Image (tube, rainbow, N blue to C red):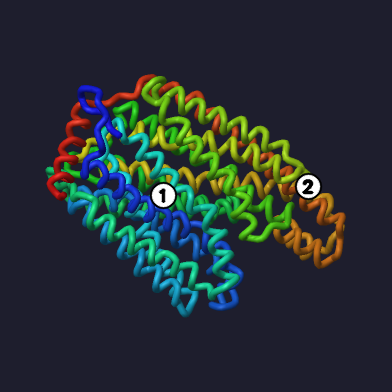
Amino acid sequence: MIESAQGEARPPSGAERRKWWALGGLALSLLVVGLDLTVLNVALPTLSTSLKASTSQLQWFANSYNLAMAIALLPGGLLGDRFGRKRMLVIALTAFGVASGFCAFASSAGELIVWRAVLGVGAAMLIPLSMSVLTVIFTPEERPRAMGIWATANMLGIPLGPILGGWLLDHYWWGSVFLINLPVVVIALAAVVWLVPESRAERKPRIDLPGLAASAVGLAAITYGLIKAGDTGWASAQALVPLLGGLVVLAGFVQLQRSPRQTLIDLELFRARGFTWGTILSTIVSFALFGLMFTLPQFYQAVEGADALGTGLRLLPLIAGLMAGVRIGQPFLKKVGSGPLIGAGFILLAVALMIGTSTGVHDGYGFVAFWLTLGGVGVGLAMPITMNAALDELSAERAGVGSALLMTIRQIGGTCAVAILGTVLNSQYRSHLAPAASHLPAPVAAAATRSAGGGVAVAAQLHSPSLLESVRSALVHATSMTMWVSAGFAVVGVLAATQLPRKARLPQQRAEAAESTGDLLNAAD
């Protein structure tokens, strides 16, 4: 029920019901994006034999998706502002569905890499466009709840990927992990077509070709450099050259955007404290969260002997905690404001990560599930509210470009997190295992120290329980150090949360804009 101006409860109107159903459709589209981030990991061993894929090609099945996302996020927001967000959502969903079908029936590794890149372009458009629609159709009072649903849908697909993918591979052929996208895409398309009102900037932004080219080259180079840094180390030429080159290109891109003729990003947004700190904080949440998502699957598989399906199931407490955190935070937002709630979320996340550092080789799953749930509650408190703090500074005029800028920074932050945490994990694992591997033949020692999975395989081949115990001990030590780094970022988040206003602001002009959108939905009825 909704309160009227006189404080009397009234049933929700058709327009109000329509926008929440529309959010459900958008949430479904985000669910398949999350699924596609992780579902392929389960199928890699099968793909290596079915498509005769090399190790490098297996890596590019994931990297092509990530690179395409980095390149297409900013253009996706601009195209929505210019040509209509609903129209571009329909195009993005269609591209995602078509690419899913071609991925499922790819006959070679090269073909799959190409269509995975197309999937990444579709995902890159879906994320900022769906977020910009929240700015247009929901009032500032409703937006935190809507953002909580949006963020939960965005996260839910990550652990569901291995669970669903593992079940499908047990019963069907590998292409089924892509075909599961199709019915969801059809439902999401129907919801967007029938329920989402069209919206665009009143003054159409021009297509900023120099900005598009510079952002694409710079973001692709930095993303590629970060990917290689995780594989070959930060000092390697393969990582340093694209990283430095990308930074130079992006510096030139920022200078281009200072011209009033360039429209790809609005630098004035960073003058708004809510957008700047909301973006920074949401990126820190992503970084700290990767401390859990990056290390735990390796811990479950190498230490607890879980398969991909079991790993996905063991990550569910994180999602349960996240959903609980979203529900806990919403009633208090108006009373205490965004800053204290975000700070509380970061405190819970930091505490959970610090508890996690004490996890030992022989600790039961119950202990891990406890602090993992606690970390999920912290993420659920912090993530939607930080993103909403940034969204509150966006007018309907620049919702697409602003949402794309926020998500681009988060995407680069997440890729950077994988590279940094991967470096910490690998270096600590190798140094801790080195004494136990020193007596092994050089090729065998290299295989054991390359990764924890390799170490477990070597120990099994040699029938060496002592080596297996050393591998598990080394991974637990490395996981602990990685979580300390993530906890450090969570502590930084606690301090940064003090920069946000204590009371949530509900700007009148944005409330009026949302009211006008309600009128549009009523007219559509």
Residue at image coords 42%, 34%: 280
The mark total stands at 2
The crowd level at tag 1 (other Cα within 10 Å; few <14, some 14-19, many 20+) is many
* Residue type at numbered disc 1: Gly
Quadrant for the N terminus in the image: top left
113 vs 333, nearest the viewer: 333
The image's mark for residue 373 is: none
Tag shown at residue 473: 2
User: Secondary structure beneath disc 2?
Assistant: helix
Residue under numbered circle 1: 246
Residue 112 in sight here: yes
Looking at the picture, does residue 42 appear above or below residue 145?
A: below
Foreground: 251 or 524?
Answer: 524
* Residue 164 shown left or right of residue 402 in the figure: right
Sooner in the amino-acid sequence: mark 2 or mark 1: 1
Report whether 362 appears left or right of 413.
Answer: right
**Mark 1 secondary-structure assignment:** helix
Q: Nearer the viewer, residue 249 or 29?
A: 29
Establish if 287 lies above or below 498.
Answer: below
